[in-house]
Amino acid sequence: MATYVIGVGSNTKGKLENVRDAIAWIDTIFCNVKSSSIYTTPATNGKDEDYANAVVKCDSDDELPIIQRRLKEYEQACGRTKESKIKGIVPIDLDIVICDNEILRPRDYNAEYFLIGWRQING
């Protein structure tokens, strides 16, 4: 069983609900789900809408590529496209930041939008 830490974010209308729904979905496909609160941070580029964020720690028997594919499929089902990403419109963003204590996304790991939730989960 692998442990995954997922950064969740949205910057569109209904962003709090989008993040809440994503956490609920994650809870249906993973085990031992632990989530931070949902909080708001400014966009890192200083121009896009503020983000609603959360961090989720969970376990799964599935391997990393399978999990990554499922997360991207969920993003697409929520309206995430290449065009929306270019325009800075993010209905939902799900990124595996840590897998079994290995930091996969150092930029996210060191960013305040991730650290707020990560600190909540780890006390």
Image (cartoon, rainbow, N blue to C red):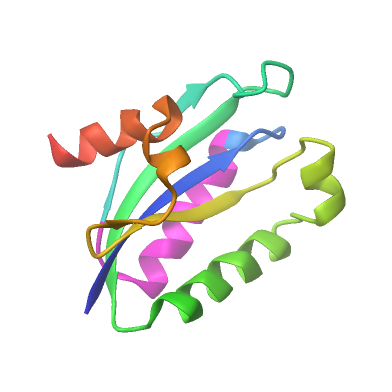
User: What secondary structure characterizes most of the magenta part?
Assistant: helix
Q: Identify the residue at image location x=87%, y=50%.
A: 83
Quarter of the figure that contains the C terminus: top left
Horizontally, residue 85 falls left or right of residue 41, namely: right
Q: x and y percent of residue 76 in the render?
A: 72, 63
Relative to 86, is 49 on the left or the right? left
Can residue 74 be spotted in the picture?
Answer: yes
Residue toward you, 120 or 16: 120
Q: Residue at x 43, y 30 (%)?
A: 111
Horizontal and vertical percent for residue 9? 54, 41
Residue that appears at 49% across and 81% down: 66
Residue 25 counted in the magenta span: yes
Magenta stretch: includes residue 78: no
Relative to residue 30, is residue 24 depicted above or below?
A: above
Residue 114, by quadrant, is top left
Does 103 appear above or below 19?
below
For the view shown, which residue lies furthest in the left direction? 123
Residue interval drawn in magenta:
16-33
Residue 31, image x and y in percent? 26, 71
